[in-house]
Amino acid sequence: MFLSAGFMIFRVWDMYQKNNLARLRRDEAQMELSKLEEQRDSLSASIASLRTRRGVEEEIRRNFLMVKEGEKVITIVDDPAIPQAKSETESNERSWWQRFIGLWSRN
């Protein structure tokens, strides 16, 4: 009788573990499906855009830096000679380490 009860407990535990594993795999598959559906929707939107003349033009301009006749390309870059302004909190506040070192400095 104890042998059959032990066998039954073992079988129930085995089924419980298999059920948990199946549930985890189902959840992983569901997440993967959601990602693939989002990717499909994104690709469908890209394809729809490329089916229009304007969409093709935008893609060519973005990937090949081409312009129409009579247009000019302007590239804006930051001038490294001009220092970037710090915010008020950055300029007024010192870190705890700077304050600690400041206790022994003569400034």
Image (cartoon, helix red, strand yellow):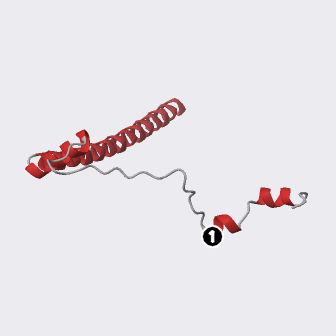
Q: List x then y, in percent, for residue 50.
A: 13, 46
Residue 27 locus on image (x, y percent) = 36, 45
- Residue in the foreground of this view, choosing between 48 and 32: 48
Res 28 → quadrant: top left
In this view, 8 is above or below 95: above
In the image, taking residue 36 as reference, residue 54 lies left or right, namely: left
Q: Badge 1 local density, few (<14 within 10 Å), some, or many (20+)?
A: few
- Which residue was labeled with disc 1? 88
Quarter-of-image position of residue 11: top left
Report x, y in % for residue 62: 25, 45
Q: How many marks?
A: 1
Query: Which amino acid type is shown beneath numbered disc 1?
Result: Glu
Q: Residue at x 73, y 62 (%)?
A: 94
Q: Residue placed farthest to the front in the image?
A: 70
User: Which residue is found at the position 81% from the left and 61% from the top?
Assistant: 99
Tell me which residue sits at (12%, 49%) in the image: 48
Residue at 57% across, 57% down:
83
Residue 32 sits above or below residue 90 on the image: above
User: Where the C terminus falls, by quadrant?
Assistant: bottom right
* Helix, strand or loop for disc 1: helix
The quarter of the displayed image where residue 90 is located: bottom right
Residue 63 left/right relative to 11: left
Residue 7 horizontal/vertical position (percent): 48, 31
In front here: 26 or 35?
A: 35
Q: Nearer the viewer, residue 2 or 57?
A: 57
* Near-viewer residue (4 or 22): 22
Tell me: residue 105, above or below residue 64. below
Task: Name the side, left or right, on which 20 lies relative to 97.
Answer: left
